[in-house]
Image: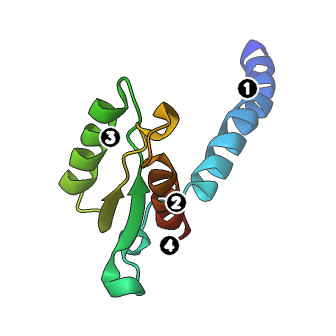
Amino acid sequence: MLSKTLLRGAKPASRCLAGPSIASRSMATTVGQDIFRPTKFGGKYTVTLIPGDGIGAEVSESVKEIFKADNVPVEWEQVDVTGIETGNKHSEELFRESIASLKR
């Protein structure tokens, strides 16, 4: 009798446990190999990289190394905008160059 009571209580619990795990497995997807294989633009993405100040330079170099190690087809177009706020005569040119790079 005790075993029947335990089994009755265990069946709904096992359904609760099995339900989400089956559902989560069916919803899980794997990253396909084709996700980073563009057909346009010669097979590479051109990405604007603005390193910034502070740790931005180190972080951006690490990102480039990681992408290279994983063979991600990215071509980096690095734009240095650190001199824009200084008010020098080239600040407008730097700003326009960075905006043009982002629009490409």
Q: In the displayed image of the protein, which residue is found farthest to the front?
A: 89
Q: In front of the other: label 3 or label 2?
A: 2
Measure the alpha-carbon separation of dots 4 and 2. 13 Å
Measure the alpha-carbon separation of dots 1 and 3. 53 Å
Q: Earlier in the sequence, mark 1 or mark 3?
A: 1
Q: Amino acid at mark 2?
A: Arg
Q: Position of residue 30 (x, y in %)?
A: 46, 60
Q: Earlier in the sequence, mark 1 or mark 4?
A: 1
Q: Nearer the viewer, residue 52 or 17?
A: 52
Disc number for residue 96: 2
Q: In front of the other: label 4 or label 2?
A: 2
- At x 61% / y 58%, what residue is drawn? 26
Q: Which residue is mark 1?
A: 10
Q: Secondary structure at mark 4?
A: loop
- At x 51% / y 34%, what residue is drawn? 85
Measure the alpha-carbon separation of dots 2 and 1. 68 Å
Q: Nearer the viewer, residue 71 or 9?
A: 71
Q: Secondary structure at mark 3?
A: helix
Q: Which residue is mark 4?
A: 104
Relative to residue 83, is residue 24 drawn left or right? right
For the residue carrying disc 3, how many other residues have a C-alpha within 10 Å: few (<14), some (14-19), or many (20+)?
A: some
Mark 2 touches mark 1? (CB < 8 Å): no
Q: Earlier in the sequence, mark 2 or mark 1?
A: 1
| 43 over 26 or under it: above or below | below
